[in-house]
Amino acid sequence: MLAPASPDLAEGKVIERNTRAVINLCWTCSSCDMECPVNKATNRLRPQKIVRLANLGFMDELLSLPEIWYCLKCKRCDYVCPNLVKPSTVICYLRKEALRRNLVSLEMIQLRRILFAKFQRVRWRAAEQCLNGEMESIADDQWYDWLETPIDALRGKISLADLNSSEAFRKVSGNSSIYCCFNCSECSNACPVSSGRSVFDPLWIFHMVHLGLEEEILKSPSIWLCIACKRCTEECSQLVNGQFIIQRLQEMAIEEGIVDKGFLFRWHKAQKVIYPCFIKEMDALFMGSGVGTLDRDKNIIELHPAQKTMIASGFSESNRIEEAQGLHERKQTTNLRKASAV
Ligand code: SF4
Ligand code: SF4
Ligand code: SF4
Ligand code: SF4
């Protein structure tokens, strides 16, 4: 029987003090896990697990978790927590700590930023494909092609004489206070998936709504890139309800038959295809090369030999989990079916 790793409660208090994320109030309800868009698509980012590890003071383990680099910083986990715990703040703190302790370089952080921006191109292409039909899988060459190929911006001058938007569309402007917008760009800065007007930029979408460009916007794959985190709404000093605008545009696209009813199902499935590719890139960037969690876990042990324990994420019944369990002498996993140990 392997001895369990002992918690370091003093370290937990340090994390608590430095983040003010009230991690000790977590009652493990899993609401954050269920709300996290990355976890929903991959089962590989559980904010609850990070909060619990922080509570136990497992700092070395936290800093070696690849999950901290998967996070989009959307704060959906914070908004949904009934006890006002802030898992996203803990993740931000861990990233800074990893940098401060030279576990990652500035160059790696910069590469991640670039890769994440390019990933929004992939999401745009995937949304476009789902608008036109099924997206079952993505081959490596298509993934890299989508990653590297910029999306063309809308071309052509828009003249006010061309505008002939429906009453329902005009109501989106009216009900969202969009006429109060003074172009400060705070919404674009706060939006975790904003990546330029040709791919997705909330301010650009609000402008299009303001101008009445109904057809262009309702047909655009861009509106489906929003992850409904409400950060644009929270940040807007003019009380423009950005999240409502985009949600209403999505609803209108379906109501008006521009997007067929099966799209949402296809789009949901597509997330499960593209997010794992993004995670694979993150693993390669931060954990060294290798395919799958077993290879990644081996790399973690090589990179962080001093850590006390290792906790697997995800669900699997394969013998690779058994092999992963044998990797670390004090590794805690509960059983084969459910390899998420915390
Ligand atoms: S939602 Fe809050 S209380 Fe529930 S598991 Fe997540 S951090 Fe803990
Ligand atoms: S900030 Fe968003 S992506 Fe990150 S853990 Fe929370 S819900 Fe998930
Ligand atoms: S934050 Fe508000 S006021 Fe500023 S650009 Fe966005 S919608 Fe306009
Ligand atoms: S709700 Fe707003 S901030 Fe969040 S993803 Fe959508 S546009 Fe961006």
Image (cartoon, rainbow, N blue to C red):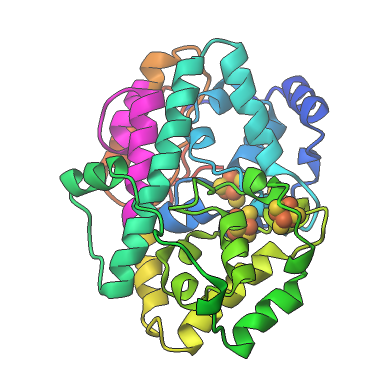
Q: Is residue 316 above or below residue 3?
A: below
Pick the quarter of the image with the N terminus: top left
Q: Which residues are magenta?
A: 272-299
Image point 56% across, 42% down: which residue? 342
The rendered magenta stretch, by its main secondary structure, is classed as helix
Q: Is residue 170 above or below residue 75?
A: below
Q: Quadrant of residue 248?
A: bottom right
Image point 28% across, 44% down: which residue? 149
Q: Quadrant of residue 270?
A: bottom left
The spot of residue 312 in percent (x, y) is: 44, 38
**Is 274 left or right of 310, judged from the image as shown?**
left
Q: Is residue 128 magenta?
A: no
Image point 32% across, 60% down: which residue? 126
The spot of residue 18 in percent (x, y) is: 79, 25
**Is 316 left or right of 205, judged from the image as shown?**
left
Q: Is residue 82 above or below residue 106?
A: below
Q: Is residue 289 magenta?
A: yes
